[in-house]
Amino acid sequence: MVEVVSKNGNLLLNIGPKSDGTIPDNQLQRLRDLGNWMQINGEGIYGTKPWKIADAILNDGTKLYFTRKDGDLYVFVMGKPKNGFISLPFIQCNSESKAILFGNGNEILPISLADKTVKIQLPEKSDFEFATMIKITNTK
């Protein structure tokens, strides 16, 4: 879903009820998982637009997707980067920019700006089971 939204697409969920009208348990569980994820990360999905870059891959192979809304950039991290941080050379931030990790009580993460690269330090303990969202405020 994150990939589709980052590329300005539409996601169609096909749910196939049984003959008695009930939804199979495996499909129902996927809907619940998606709903739980959206409760935490929906801000980076609803009302957003594609950013100038739809996706990127970190040196360790971790995939990232991007959306934007107003002056904020939403970075979706697909898995946990092996080195514990993400470096983004193509984002323009300022001294008021913040990196907020959703799902951990909206924890503010350490962010540094060096050589026109934004480096965000990730917490050691975090749930990276599904796409993890980081909101970077005051970006260009």
Image: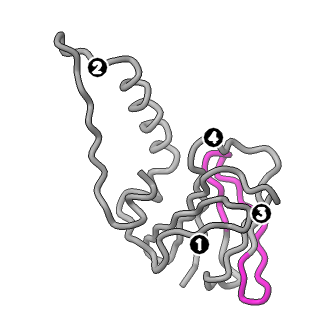
Q: Main secondary structure of the magenta part?
A: strand
Q: Earlier in the sequence, mark 1 or mark 3?
A: 3
In-front residue for pair 49/53: 53
Q: Amino acid at mark 2?
A: Ile
Q: Secondary structure at mark 2?
A: loop
Q: Amino acid at mark 3?
A: Phe
Q: Where residue 49 appears, x then y in whole percent?
A: 38, 70
How far is disc 4 from disc 1 in space, using C-alphas?
Answer: 24 Å
- The label on residue 87 is none
Image position of 16 (left or right of 45):
left
Mark 1 or mark 2: name the one nearer the start of the chain.
2
Are the residues tagged 1 and 3 within 8 Å (C-beta)?
no
Q: Residues within 10 Å of mark 1 (few under 14, many from 20)?
A: some
Q: Point out which mark residue 137 bears.
A: 1
Question: Residue type at mark 1?
Answer: Thr
| Front one among 53 and 132 | 53
Sequence-wise first label, 4 or 3: 3
Crowding around mark 3 (Cα neighbors within 10 Å: few <14, some 14 to 19, many 20+) is: some
Instruction: State the residue position of label 4.
Output: 129
What x and y, as percent, mark residue 127?
Answer: 68, 41
Residue 114 appears at what percent x and percent y?
Answer: 79, 85
Residue 85 - label: 3
Q: Secondary structure at mark 4?
A: loop
Residue 39 lies within the magenta run: no
Q: Which residues are magenta?
A: 99-118
What residue is rendered at 39% in x and 32% in y? 31
Q: Earlier in the sequence, mark 4 or mark 1?
A: 4
Callout 2: few (<14), some (14-19), or many (20+) C-alpha neighbours within 10 Å?
some
Residue with the mark numbered 2: 23
Which element type, helix, strand or loop, lies under badge 3? strand
Position of residue 98 relative to residue 131, above or below, is below
Residue at mark 2 to residue at mark 4: CA–CA distance:
25 Å
